[in-house]
Image: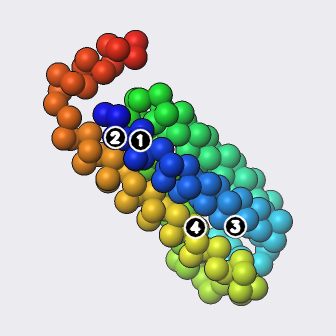
């Protein structure tokens, strides 16, 4: 299990840092300039702003929980939280389902950097899950007993 912390913690921190940066930029622009994005018919700009802000906080909470659990050796739980967090990047791509984006290039690019961060997180989760599957059940149980779970 040590390989997950030894080899995984630094890449996870980089991915989470990148995800945090790109989603802060994109989601903030979505809230501040919501009227510049395609709107769902029947949903007000204010409602959109509230949902976007709440969504970012909710997704980011899952990311923080995933990081905490990963750092504390609760890997499967951490990976589940991290997969939920990755949805913050995928949600950005939903703009294309609603209409054409007519926003400055920098903000347009954040849709793609959000998706890239989600992909990086999925790759990391797959790598960690494959590593976990290489450890016997007995070793996992003994590890959990050692760390007090």
| Circle 2/circle 1 CB separation < 8 Å | yes
Name the residue rendered at 26%, 39% in the picture: 132
| Circle 3/circle 1 CB separation < 8 Å | no
In the picture of the structure, the residue carrying the numbered disc 1 is 6
Mark identifier at residue 114: 4
Q: What is the quadrant of the N terminus in the image?
A: top left
Name the residue rendered at 59%, 40% in the picture: 64
Taking 90 as reference, is 149 left or right? left
Q: Residues within 10 Å of mark 1 (few under 14, many from 20)?
A: few
Distance from disc 1 to disc 4, alpha carbons, whole Å, reads 27 Å
Find residue 78 and report its image quarter.
top left
| Circle 1/circle 4 CB separation < 8 Å | no
| Circle 3/circle 4 CB separation < 8 Å | yes
Q: Earlier in the sequence, mark 1 or mark 4?
A: 1
Disc 1 is placed on an element classified as: helix
Mark identifier at residue 3: 2
Q: Nearer the viewer, mark 1 or mark 4?
A: 1
Q: Is 41 in front, or is 79?
A: 79
In the picture of the structure, the residue carrying the numbered disc 3 is 26
Disc 3 is placed on an element classified as: helix
Distance from disc 4 to disc 2, alpha carbons, whole Å, reads 28 Å
Q: Residue 142: where, in percent of width, then height?
A: 25, 17
Q: What is the quadrant of the C terminus in the image?
A: top left
């Amino acid at each position: 299990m040590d390989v997950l912390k030894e080899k995984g913690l630094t890449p996870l921190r980089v991915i989470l840092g990148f995800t945090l940066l790109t989603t802060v930029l994109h989601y903030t622009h979505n809230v501040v300039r919501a009227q510049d994005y395609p709107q769902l018919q029947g949903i007000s700009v204010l409602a959109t702003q509230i949902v976007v802000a709440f969504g970012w906080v909710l997704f980011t909470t899952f990311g923080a929980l995933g990081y905490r659990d990963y750092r504390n050796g609760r890997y499967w739980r951490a990976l589940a939280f991290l997969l939920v967090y990755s949805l913050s990047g995928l949600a950005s791509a939903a703009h294309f389902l609603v209409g054409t984006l007519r926003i400055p290039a920098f903000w347009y690019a954040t849709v793609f950097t959000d998706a890239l961060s989600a992909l990086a997180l999925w790759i990391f989760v797959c790598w960690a899950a494959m590593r976990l599957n290489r450890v016997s059940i007995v070793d996992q149980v003994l590890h959990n007993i050692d760390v007090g779970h």
